[in-house]
Image (cartoon, rainbow, N blue to C red):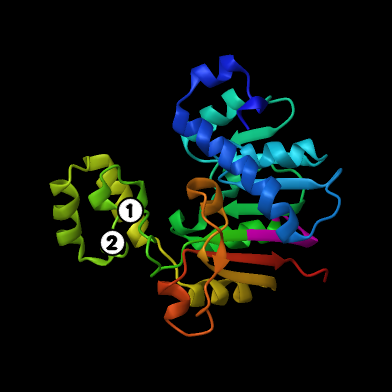
Amino acid sequence: MDHLLSKDLINKISKRCIRCYNEQYWYAENFLFDYLGDQNMKGKDVLEIGCAEAGLLRYYKNIGAHCSGLELSDVRFNNAIILNDKNQLHLFQANICEPKSYQNELVKQYDLIVIRDVIEHIKDKETALKNMYNILKPGGKLFISYPPKFCPYAGHQQTIPNILGKLPYIYLLPNYLYIKYLRLIGCKAKKIEYLIDTKKTRISNKRMLELICKIGFKLKNKSNWFIRPAYSFRFNLPSFKNPFAFIPILDEILCNGMLLTLERPES
């Protein structure tokens, strides 16, 4: 998918950034569009919360949607600006938990909102979900993906460069032991802070379903994946669902990705 980018752009940013952008585009084109069952997105309004490099939005723009992307991180937002024509994608920095930060940018409601592998990092999930409900059109869809609280990599330790940090479930160690181990294998202080923060903000499937019910969303679809679809791009693995998803506890510890499709009721 590098053919979508000029050589000049590719030379401006890191290979990791390019790979993230390509994965986002691939995910939209090869999985999400079909998964959501939307036959025609022409003229539809799409918002991604935590859009990162905005590759997913680039795909939806290419099939005719009007696309907006909210990103909190300075680095990821700057990458998105470099990689995309700002006249084609509406990209801005804001915090979904703070309506004042986006009130001048989001002046309409959306047919589709996507929040992919972001909700687990948000401390106040209830406020975030309420705000998403308010900016979603009646009848519109909200797509959420996240690693549940006790899944093998809920601590995002797969992002540790050292292979010794990528052990499944290791984030479940008590914090003082986990921090000592991370220091021992050479993790920098900033990385350790990120990993501990991620550990604190995890959410279980049960709690997520309680929140969406409380806020008023209608659950249209849920799927629990042992090898989630994004791993087909990252590791060339065939994706398949968790065969034990119907069993409490196993629905989390054997799940590497939970996908929810929600709807704001018409009335």
Question: What percent of the width, then of the height, locates residue 57?
Answer: 68, 40
Q: Horizontal placement of 80 versus 195: left or right? A: right
User: With respect to residue 116, does 82 lie above or below?
Assistant: above
Indicate left or right for 251 with 9 as reference: left
Per the image, label 2 sits on a secondary structure element best described as helix
Q: Which residue is mark 1?
A: 157
- Front one among 192 and 215: 192
Q: Is residue 201 visible?
A: yes
Q: Which stretch did the figure color magenta?
A: 135-143
Residue 142 magenta-highlighted? yes
Residue 182 percent location from the top left of the image: 19, 50
Q: Can residue 105 be seen? A: no
Q: Residues within 10 Å of mark 2 (few under 14, many from 20)?
A: many
**Does the magenta segment cover residue 5?**
no
Where residue 252 appears, as percent x and y from the top left, is: 44, 74
Could you say which is closer to the camera, residue 3 or residue 9?
A: 3
Say which amino acid is labelled 2: Tyr
Q: Measured from the top left, where is residue 122 in percent x and y?
A: 46, 55
Q: How many marks?
A: 2
CA distance for labels 1 and 2 = 7 Å
* Quadrant of the image occupied by residue 260: bottom right
Q: Please rate how many residues cluster around mark 1, counting C-alpha atoms within 10 Å: few if below 14, some from 14 to 19, many from 20.
A: many
Q: Nearer the viewer, residue 167 or 74?
A: 167
Element type at mark 1: helix
Residue receiving disc 2:
171
Residue that lies at the very extreme toward the top in this rendered image: 8
Q: Are marks 1 and 2 in contact (CB under 8 Å)?
A: yes
Amino acid identity at mark 1: Gln
